[in-house]
Structures are given as structure tokens and as C-alpha cells.
């Protein structure tokens, strides 16, 4: 099953709960990166990248909770958390790069 479709398997009563929260936090990651980039200012970009990191941590928390309450299988939890870790590393690297260019 594609990972984007994982929340489709959640119970219908979760549509405004965990399903919505996970989808919103995942979308916020990309939206914050795009908004920061669109500001065309390195300081703003770093600020929005940090907000994206917060959304990523929020998503990680939702993944852990979804598994804990039985909405998500352990294998999917592990894979999703590994992807989150990889994305987090990329964002931290991007922040360091932008900050280094800002200091030039």
C-alpha cells in the first residue's frame, strides 16, 4: 500500500481526528518549506524550515500514537519513522547550508 494511502485505512470515525491531524501535519511540512522559499529571504527561509521541522515532529508523534492505539501496523510505523528521520536530516542540513550562506 502506498504510504500516502495509509490513513485511508483508518476508521471513518477518525476522519476528523487522527486522519486529519496526520494529513495536516504532513502537508504543513511541504507548505512551510515552500512559503519560506517564496519569501526570497534567507532569514525567513530558516524560520519556515524550523516550522517545517516542528510539523515533522508533530507527524512523528501522530505516527507513534496511531500505532499505539492500533490504527497503524508496527511495520508501517517503523518505515514511516525512518522516512521522517531522513527528511529531518535533510532539513537540518538545508538549514545549516542556508545559515552559512547568510553569514557570507
Image (cartoon, rainbow, N blue to C red):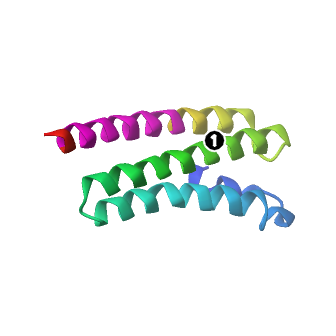
Secondary structure at badge 1 equals helix
The C terminus appears in which quarter of the rendering?
A: top left
Q: Is 83 placed above or below 20 here?
A: above
Residue at the extreme left of the image, as rendered: 104
The residue lying toward the viewer, choosing from 87 and 53, is 53
Report whether 103 appears left or right of 25.
Answer: left
Give the magenta part as a residue range: 84-101
Q: Residue at x 46, y 37 (%)?
A: 88
- Give me the residue at 48% from left, 51% from top: 52
Total marks shown come to 1
90 lies above or below 26: above
Residue at 61%, 62% in the rendered image: 24
In-front residue for pair 69/41: 41
Specify whether residue 98 is painted magenta: yes
> Where in the figure is residue 86, as x and y percent of width and height?
45, 34
Residue 68, percent from left and from top:
82, 37
Residue 8 can be seen, yes or no: no
**Residue wearing tag 1:** 60
Bin the neighbour count of mark 1 within 10 Å (Cα to Cα): few under 14, some 14-19, many 20 and up. Answer: many
Q: Nearer the viewer, residue 41 or 23?
A: 41
Nearest to the observer: residue 95 or residue 5: 95
Image-quadrant location for residue 40: bottom left
Residue at screen point 56% across, 55% down: 26
The secondary structure that dominates the magenta segment is helix
Residue 8 at x, y percent in the picture: 70, 60
From this view, report whether residue 57 is shown above or below residue 29. above
Q: Position of residue 29 (x, y in %)?
A: 49, 54
Amino acid at each position: 500500500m502506498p504510504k500516502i494511502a495509509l490513513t485511508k485505512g483508518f476508521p471513518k470515525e477518525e476522519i476528523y481526528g487522527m486522519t486529519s491531524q496526520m494529513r495536516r501535519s504532513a502537508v504543513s511540512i511541504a507548505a512551510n518549506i515552500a512559503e519560506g522559499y517564496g519569501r526570497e529571504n534567507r532569514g525567513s527561509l530558516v524560520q519556515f524550515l524550523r516550522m517545517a521541522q516542528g510539523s515533522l515532529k508533530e507527524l512523528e508523534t501522530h505516527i507513534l500514537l496511531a500505532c499505539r492505539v492500533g490504527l497503524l501496523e508496527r511495520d508501517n510505523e517503523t518505515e514511516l519513522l525512518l522516512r521522517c528521520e531522513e527528511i529531518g536530516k535533510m532539513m537540518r542540513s538545508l538549514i545549516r547550508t542556508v545559515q552559512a550562506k547568510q553569514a557570507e
